[in-house]
């Protein structure tokens, strides 16, 4: 698994703009091992959510590679420092409102909460004052 962030900041006088690209790579759901007694043995890779499975019969119809797709989001942050001792900021997370990819192993939320989130696009306004 790869989880990466790439940021770039542009500053001009009292203005500061930062863009961040967040990436989570695809996650394979192929089962490549089985347990016989207390011994783990390799098997021919098989999708645990194949059409024959009663858990999710249409999984391989929509995800033929048997993996949770990659997920990319973009965040923007703007700060203005033109007032004495005051910083005003606006953050927009997940600016393109990208949904977390479906993961059948997490039946209650439908997504891997350790790698993804269900927040969608959201805004944060902030004001800081230094005494």
Image (tube, rainbow, N blue to C red):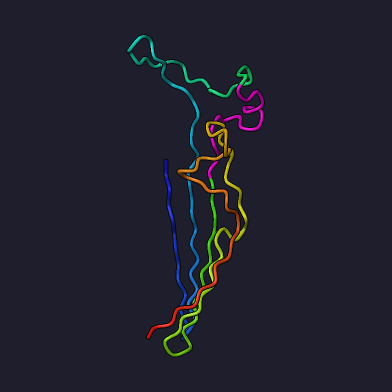
Q: Is residue 2 above or below residue 18?
A: above
Magenta span: 55-70
Name the residue rendered at 60%, 19% in the picture.
53
Residue 27 spot, x, y in % from top left: 48, 36
Query: Looking at the magenta stretch, what is its main secondary structure?
Result: loop
Residue 81 spot, x, y in % from top left: 46, 84
Of 66 and 126, the residue lying toward us: 126
Residue lying at the far bottom of the rendered structure:
84
Q: Is residue 78 above or below residue 49?
A: below
Name the residue rendered at 50%, 66% in the picture.
19
Q: Is residue 105 above or below residue 93?
A: above
The quadrant of the rendering that contains the C terminus is bottom left
Q: State which quadrant residue 52 falls in.
A: top right
Q: Is residue 57 magenta?
A: yes
Residue lying at the far left of the rendered structure:
38
Residue lying at the far front of the rendered structure:
131
Residue 73 spot, x, y in % from top left: 54, 55
Q: Is residue 37 above or below residue 107?
A: above
Of 30 and 114, the residue lying toward us: 114
Number of disc labels: 0
Residue 88 spot, x, y in % from top left: 50, 79
Q: State which quadrant residue 123 falls in.
A: bottom right
The quadrant of the rendering that contains the N terminus is top left
């Amino acid at each position: 698994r790869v989880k990466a962030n790439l940021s770039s900041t542009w500053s001009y006088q009292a203005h500061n703009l930062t863009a961040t690209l967040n990436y989570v790579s695809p996650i394979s759901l192929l089962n490549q091992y089985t347990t016989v007694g207390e011994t783990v043995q390799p098997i021919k890779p098989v999708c645990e959510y194949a059409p024959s499975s009663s858990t999710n019969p249409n999984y391989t119809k929509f995800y033929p590679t048997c993996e949770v797709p990659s997920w990319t989001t973009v965040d923007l942050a703007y700060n203005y420092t033109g007032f004495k001792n005051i910083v005003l900021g606006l953050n927009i997370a997940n600016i393109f409102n990208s949904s977390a990819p479906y993961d059948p192993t997490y039946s209650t939320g439908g997504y891997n909460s350790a790698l993804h989130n269900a927040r969608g696009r959201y805004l944060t306004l902030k004001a800081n004052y230094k005494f």
